[in-house]
Amino acid sequence: MTSHDAVSSTGRAFGRRSLLKGTLAAAGIAALPSALAGCANSTSSGGSEASGTVSFGCNAAVPEPKGAYQTLFTAAKQSTGLTVDVNWVDHNTFQNNITTYLQGNPQDVYTWFAGERMQYFAAQGLASNVNDVWDKIGGSYSDAMKAQSKGSDGNYYFVPFDYYPWAVFYSKSLWASKGYEAPTTWDDFITLANKMKSDKLIPLAFTDKDGWPAMGTFDYLNMRINGFESHINLMRTGQGWNTPQVTAVFDQWKQLIPYYSPGFLGLTWQEGANQILNKQAGMMVLGLDQIGTIFTGSNADDLGFFPFPEINATYGQDAVEAPIDGFMVCKSPKNSAGASKLLEYLGTAGAQQVWLGSNPADIATASGVDKSKYTKPQTAAISLIDSAKNLSQFMDRDTLPSFADPVMLPAIQQFLSSPNDVPSLLKNIDAQAKTIWATNS
């Protein structure tokens, strides 16, 4: 569906698909919030009757997700009678201006993300609770999904729609031709990387031009070394960055850098995923939501993956990164009843089945979806997530928006450029974290 992004207190974000570069900022970024809200004056009817038009702010203006949404909204009209008036905005423009957008004249319903990203705007009073929707759809969701949809005040502010795991992906046909087997431990992982190197492959298609892909590797290393609870505590409190525990994460990470794609800091995730598709590289740590859009059609079932390997036997492979995407309602919707009715529909297995028919890179959140229609990677993704003891949401969802974007993204890139300067790096991160959390307390 969408990718999840870090949003700063000024509304700026780094998109999962790509980053807005300085050229865009120089070309008129100040004008973008008005573009975002350009369709906010819909023809929807007010009052309590769920009818007419519901305005919808969507961050999927590019062809593939947009087409899936158009199919979905056609089905929504057939089911509910509501017309969905969509303000199509490209992903990065939407994320880069989300705070300004929500403070202005937003659409009734908008695309967004679970966890800290949702809770942040709910706490700011920039979203309406959707408790009435959950009264209708609650029976179709697990307790874990319900927990990820609540604000810190215990009210529901989010309707989950799809989600997907991060894992280590590979080409099944390449692995079969080489006789590779999925490793479960770190030592086996490194042994396999060395074998791939001797086979003239790039062992790990790692690409970080966009900044955010490396966050997934940090998350998994930290959860595998220090455990899920320690990782979430670090993300949520900002305490403990300049410690031996975090130093160990970066020291472990150094072992992987020799196996990465040449020039990885100048490559996009799409280029890395294509290295896997074209059998130039053996493995890649990424999300199914991303690499699943590269392995399409006849290639879909050639996409395999395995959980990030165990490092500390105490924690094994018990945590899985599984970001959840969905929808929220603005603070003052023009068609409140219509917004609720639309979300009741989008929260059903039927609606999510329609979406997945056009976008097979994700998994439905509601129970009751016909899993026989899933691709092999989707089916395997369900097994991976179901086997997890703990689910994380990705760094830029699990921590403060003012920390993920301006601090951690450049800090990780600095590490990747100068991996032997960890002590000063962590000292700087720790100092910034203390300042940011003090400001937000």
Image (cartoon, rainbow, N blue to C red):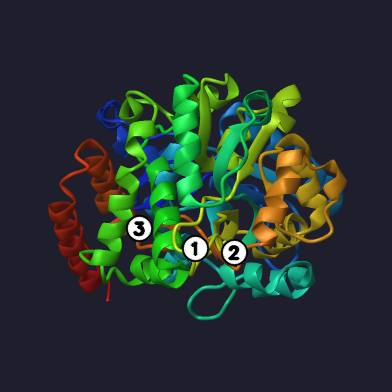
Disc 2 target residue: 158
Quadrant for the C terminus in the image: bottom left
At x 62%, y 41%, the residue is 305
Disc 1 target residue: 118
Q: Residue 425, position in %: x, y? A: 17, 52
Q: Residue 289, position in %: x, y? A: 59, 41
Q: Residue 27, position in %: x, y? A: 29, 26
Residue 45 seen anywhere in this rendered image of the structure: yes
Task: Indicate the amino acid at tag 3.
Answer: Pro
Q: Earlier in the sequence, mark 1 or mark 3?
A: 1
* Mark 3 or 2, closer to the camera: 3
Q: Secondary structure beneath disc 2?
A: loop
Q: Earlier in the sequence, mark 2 or mark 1?
A: 1
At x 73%, y 68%, the residue is 141
Task: Indicate the amino acid at tag 1.
Answer: Met
Q: Which mark is residue 157?
A: none
Label 2 environment density (alpha carbons within 10 Å; few <14, some 14–19, many ≥20): many
In the image: residue 185, left or right of residue 21: right
Disc 3 target residue: 401
